[in-house]
Image (cartoon, coloured by chain):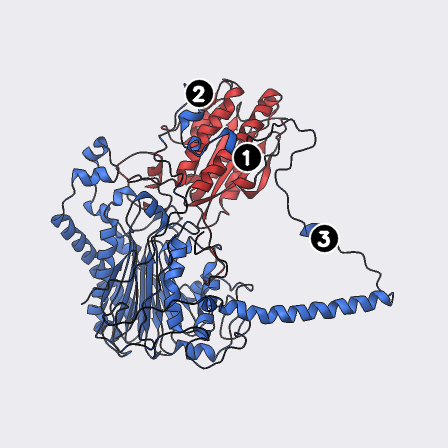
Chain colours: A blue, B red
Amino acid sequence: MSEPQETAPVNWDSTDHWSVLAANAVGASHQASGRPGQDAFSFAPSDHTTDQPLAVAVADGHGHRIHFRSKVGSRVAVEVACDTVLRAADALAACHDVEEVRAHALDVLLPQVVEGWRAGCLGDLEERPVTVEELEAVGFSEEERAGAFDDDDPLLAYGSTLMFAGLAGPWLLLAHIGDGDIFTVEVDGTSAQPVPGDPLLDGQRTTSLCQPDALGSFRIAVIDVAGRPPAVVALATDGYGNAQNRDDWQPGVGADMALYLRSEGRTWIGHQLPDWVSRCASVEGSADDTTMALLISPRAEQRARTVPPSSPGHPGSDRNGHSSAATTLLATPGSVASLASARERTLPMAPSEAPVFPVGGRPASPGPAPGLAFPEPPPAAPALRGTQSAPEVATGRQGGWPANAPGAPPPPTPTKSARRLDPRLRGRMVWVAAGALGVLVAVIVVVIVLTTGSSGGKSPDLTPLLPRSFGTLAPGATLPAAPKPSSTTSPSSTTSPSSNTSPGTDTLPDSGQNTAGQAGSNVGGVASPATTGP
Amino acid sequence: MSSFGSSSSIMPGGGISRRPLDFFIMADCSGSMTGEKIQALNFAIADMLPHLAIWERDQEQAAMRVRAVAFGDEAVWHVAEPTPVSQLRWPPLQAKGRTRMGRALEVVAEAMNHLERRALRPAVILITDGRPTDDFDSGLAALLATPAGRSALRLAVAIGRDAELDPLERFIGDPSVPVLVADSAEEIADRLIAASIAVSRLSEVHVGGGHDANAKGVLGVRAPASNIDDERIV
């Protein structure tokens, strides 16, 4: 696996504006099979001030071979989404309430996105007609090619999910079709999923821009960010969530992000993000293409330092740890969900994941953490308009400049000491020390009690703490010992029916290419961005 | 060693890991399996596990976890906890009683409702030498009522010619996937190895193929080609 590449340094000296951080990586499974990355992201800041619109989009092209041009489909999706949001920004900003924003999004903006995507893909199809060689390359047999797409929409080949965020005036519009995750993080670390879920997404199937009724499968949310915007708005393809250990991973990730913001700041997060997505895309994670884009709100760091980290039941949050700071309207085409139902979907903060104390010894003043040697920020560059496809990274500040802008100094490489600066670890050290002190006191008390002869309790039963055993052979069992893999089998035998199956064996479909020996394939790293100009 | 393997590396949340691939073994422990058959089945399963462990080690996407249900007079968990295939030492089965196959399907169906959200398409293998003595259809309906059970790769091994193939074929639900018939106890191991190969394909990837575990079907869209993988395109 290759070393993760850091993001290029960006002019993060001011935290007064909305910032964009984004990175992606090609999945290990794609690399092993020689397939391209099919994720894409794009963002379109247009000015230096917070009053200007901002659009960020992330898309995940489908992996099945029938979507053999999904890499193009995802790229078209993010570009169309950003362009459409910026075109609609004035109209969105002029809306008087969230209901008006919702109506405009459903009636005007989303139809334009869907139509724009179809037009863009049809344009690609016209420019590059599908060839026999292309179908052969993705594994279609001659028989399959003969009538493969006779009755199907040609845009099936371009299938992709799409999620995007549009900031216009006081409104933040979030829209989503397909799998992946959009979640918000408040300054106290609570997280929420403002966009309603879709029960049709069962992990095996997804909604898509290529389906005939794509417009009907969009889900949206509108957030009033004029008052207290969420600290972070995250958009991530399913490669990120599928790599996480826990099903309810968002509260933990959100709490940690708030902690990082509080203690390290957005520049530090920007440098870490490529590593995060690369790890998720690796064989240690989902092995799938992974993209994450983060919108960080103005003065999020300062605001985070003024509030204590949240825990379940924290004032300002409901019982699920959901902050009520932002006004949110949830909507799906044809139906409007209530805020109450959204809160019910909000997963509770896991106590073990929630930071309970500010980072010990960390000065409250903003700026780089001790041990982090960030270079002086370069001067601001002209307006930014970037589009990325995997594997790429980019960072941008609204009105800022692309991560690889000409003249930008090389990215700082975190030192070992920087890697040791995990704020969670530092915070927990305080508690470890406190815990050790508590144990010491308890031992002293027990010794005193025992020596005074006042303890009549039984010894604790440690049985539940013993490791659970599996597969213990029953006494006297006649089961032969399992053959040692090295002596009785080979890696190839696990994928070659003929090697272990007697003649006349019932056959199963051919196993295809053996992937033995491909474990540990590199993610391929996250290349420095090739951010395109306007 | 991977540069990402260090636990000291900073990352938000509770850590990452490979996606789980849940493999359910449903083993017939009815009275007719007594003697040579049950011993051969125990041997065959124990022989299959190292093959799967090697496969797991050598592929990129899945962490296989095994559970087993034994069904005779009752259907009970034989390996109750999802156990990494490389760590499982097969506890021998004991044969006794009737063939409550339908109830076993219900037990697996209940477990299917609690798989991790990120879990890969699961696999279920049903091994029997007879015919169900309870309500098989009800059990199968329960399994197929769960999204994971419906999308699971379902395989069946019939031990001997007395095994009734019709319920096994309905359990598989795909005419292109045959019931694996072991005419003798000696052939049980071969059939299970063949089945394990099919299971390992669940997360196999190859150029241009559709066997990418991360590949999904699109709702409302049917794939033009027909194979196991395309079951997901509905």
Q: Please rate how many residues cluster around mark 1, counting C-alpha atoms within 10 Å: few if below 14, some from 14 to 19, many from 20.
A: many
Q: Is residue A219 left or right of residue A259?
A: left
Q: Which residue is mark 2?
A: A502
Q: Chain of mark 1?
A: B
Q: Residue at x 60, y 24 (%)?
A: B39
Q: Nearer the viewer, mark 3 or mark 2?
A: 2
Could you tell me residue A325's position as x and y percent? Answer: 43, 75
- Circles 2 and 1, Cβ within 8 Å, touching? The answer is no
Which quadrant is the C terminus of chain B positioned in?
top left
In the image shown, does B42 or A197 lie closer to the viewer? B42
Instruction: Using the numbered discs, state the Cα–Cα distance from disc 1 to disc 3 in whole angstroms.
Output: 34 Å
Task: Give amino acid for label 3.
Answer: Leu
Q: Which residue is mark 1?
A: B104
Could you tell me residue B188's position as x and y percent? Answer: 51, 24
Q: Nearer the viewer, mark 1 or mark 3?
A: 3
Task: Give amino acid for label 2.
Answer: Ser
Q: Is residue A37 left or right of residue B143?
A: left
Could you tell me residue A29's position as x and y percent? Answer: 36, 46
Instruction: Using the numbered discs, state the Cα–Cα distance from disc 3 to disc 2 in whole angstroms.
Output: 50 Å
Q: Please rate how many residues cluster around mark 3, counting C-alpha atoms within 10 Å: few if below 14, some from 14 to 19, many from 20.
A: few
Instruction: Using the numbered discs, state the Cα–Cα distance from disc 2 to disc 1 in whole angstroms.
Output: 30 Å
Task: Give amino acid for label 1.
Answer: Ala
Furthest residue in direction bottom, as rendered: A365
Q: Chain of mark 2?
A: A
Quarter holding residue A406:
bottom left
Q: How many marks?
A: 3
Q: Which residue is mark 3?
A: A462
